[in-house]
């Protein structure tokens, strides 16, 4: 299952801006900026998981290395550097900030950035994936190089949590937020990848209708993953079922909003809550909050859900290894009672 998911995600990844679906505003803005010669030293792509931030960053990075910016973001079919090994000949460095995020890591990269780009490259470009994982102190080190117009280094940050980035650092960036796909975008994506996934048109229609009401992010990455599962067994329930930590959090937050605290305790389990798990819970709870609010709107239930999960997110920031699941449940339970009392005007 995991192998087929990876194959489809890689084989159907956009190779140029013309193949990107649902981000027309972002692409138009980037092209306008380049055409006007307003080239920043830093770029920021933010948005939900699976939205294509890293893909856009890669296409942008390779495009910036080309001699001709006439059709920026697109390449001749006979020579597409994105889909060929020639992409790796450019002076482009991809860095996973989940693993390289400390002061020493940043200092090493900054030192490398001081050198001239390799032959055949206009710039020395650094793509930071999961940029929100860079420590606060390490982000401070990036302020000077992202402002320096004397060297030929460029910085591209990709993150699902832009609020964790240094405010000054964000102001130095050309900022673009990718969005979930609307029904038109989803339809275009399914038509494009359906054949590659080996799904007939009738099954694609069934999947499309179910996807409209499914509780998943409507991003290309998430949709492709669900489609991959559906292609393997034809089971829609399995296709949209959250997995791993995301599945645990999904069920836990659902139970929390309904006041089913025994279920919450069961989902948390008997182990201790680690800081790493807390970060994942906070991010996933935020995504669940957005999904539920879109469904419930400005209703009493929507307000209750919003306040409950906001309390959960605030509490998650204080999780550490000493907090047992029962402590977490008690905090959430007290917060929900407080919100319920406020809603009653008592």
Image (spheres, helix red, strand yellow):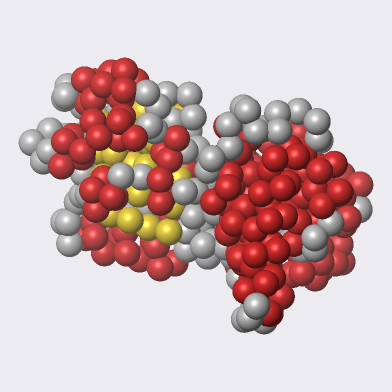
Residue 24 position within the rendered picture, expressed as x and y whole percent measured from the top left: 44, 67
Residue 285 position within the rendered picture, expressed as x and y whole percent measured from the top left: 64, 53
Residue at horizontal 49%, vertical 29%? Answer: 98
Residue at horizontal 76%, vertical 33%? Answer: 2
Residue at horizontal 68%, vertical 52%? Answer: 332
Q: Is residue 103 visible?
A: yes
Vertical position of residue 128 compared to residue 216: above or below: above
The one of 194 and 302 positioned closer to us in this rendering: 302
Q: Residue furthest front?
A: 346
In the displayed structure image, the side of residue 301 where residue 315 appears, left or right = left
The one of 51 and 262 positioned closer to us in this rendering: 262
The one of 254 and 218 positioned closer to us in this rendering: 254
Vertical position of residue 324 compared to residue 189: above or below: above
Question: Which image quarter holds the N terminus?
Answer: top right
In the displayed structure image, the side of residue 39 where residue 341 appears, left or right = right
The one of 107 and 309 positioned closer to us in this rendering: 309
Residue at horizontal 32%, vertical 64%? Answer: 29
Question: Which image quarter holds the C terminus?
Answer: bottom right
Q: Residue furthest left?
A: 150
In the displayed structure image, the side of residue 225 where residue 23 appears, left or right = left
Vertical position of residue 281 compared to residue 118: above or below: below
Count of residue discs: 0
Residue 128 position within the rendered picture, expressed as x and y whole percent measured from the top left: 39, 35
Q: Is residue 68 visible?
A: no
Quadrant for residue 102, please give it.
Answer: top left
In the displayed structure image, the side of residue 12 where residue 101 appears, left or right = left
């Amino acid at each position: 299952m995991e192998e087929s998911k990876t194959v489809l995600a890689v084989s159907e990844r956009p190779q140029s801006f013309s193949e990107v679906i649902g981000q027309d505003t972002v692409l138009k803005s980037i092209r306008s900026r380049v055409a006007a010669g307003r080239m920043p030293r830093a770029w920021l792509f933010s948005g939900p998981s699976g939205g294509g931030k890293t893909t856009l960053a890669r296409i942008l990075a390779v495009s910036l290395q080309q001699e001709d910016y006439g059709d920026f973001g697109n390449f001749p079919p006979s020579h597409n550097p994105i889909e060929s090994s020639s992409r790796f000949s450019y002076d482009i460095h991809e860095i996973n900030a989940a693993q390289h995020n400390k002061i020493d890591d940043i200092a090493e990269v900054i030192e490398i950035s001081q050198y001239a780009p390799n032959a055949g490259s206009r710039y020395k470009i650094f793509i930071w994936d999961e940029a929100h994982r860079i420590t606060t102190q390490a982000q401070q080190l990036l302020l000077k190089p992202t402002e320096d117009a004397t060297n030929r280094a460029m910085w591209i940050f990709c993150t699902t949590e832009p609020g964790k980035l240094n405010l000054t650092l964000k102001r130095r960036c050309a900022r673009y937020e990718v969005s979930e796909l609307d029904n038109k975008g989803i339809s275009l994506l399914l038509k494009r990848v359906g054949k590659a996934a080996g799904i007939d048109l009738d099954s694609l229609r069934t999947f499309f209708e179910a996807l409209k009401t499914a509780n998943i992010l409507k991003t290309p990455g998430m949709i492709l993953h669900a489609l991959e599962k559906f292609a393997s067994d034809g089971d829609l329930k399995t296709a949209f079922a959250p997995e791993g930590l995301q599945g645990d959090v999904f069920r836990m937050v659902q139970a929390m909003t309904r006041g089913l605290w025994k279920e919450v305790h069961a989902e948390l389990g008997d182990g201790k809550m680690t800081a790493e798990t807390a970060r994942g819970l906070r991010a996933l709870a935020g995504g669940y909050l957005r999904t539920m609010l879109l469904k419930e709107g400005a209703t009493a239930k929507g307000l209750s859900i919003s306040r409950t999960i906001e309390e959960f997110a605030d509490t998650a920031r204080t999780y550490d290894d000493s907090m047992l699941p029962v402590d977490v449940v008690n905090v959430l339970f007290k917060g929900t009672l407080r919100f319920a009392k406020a809603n009653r005007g008592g």
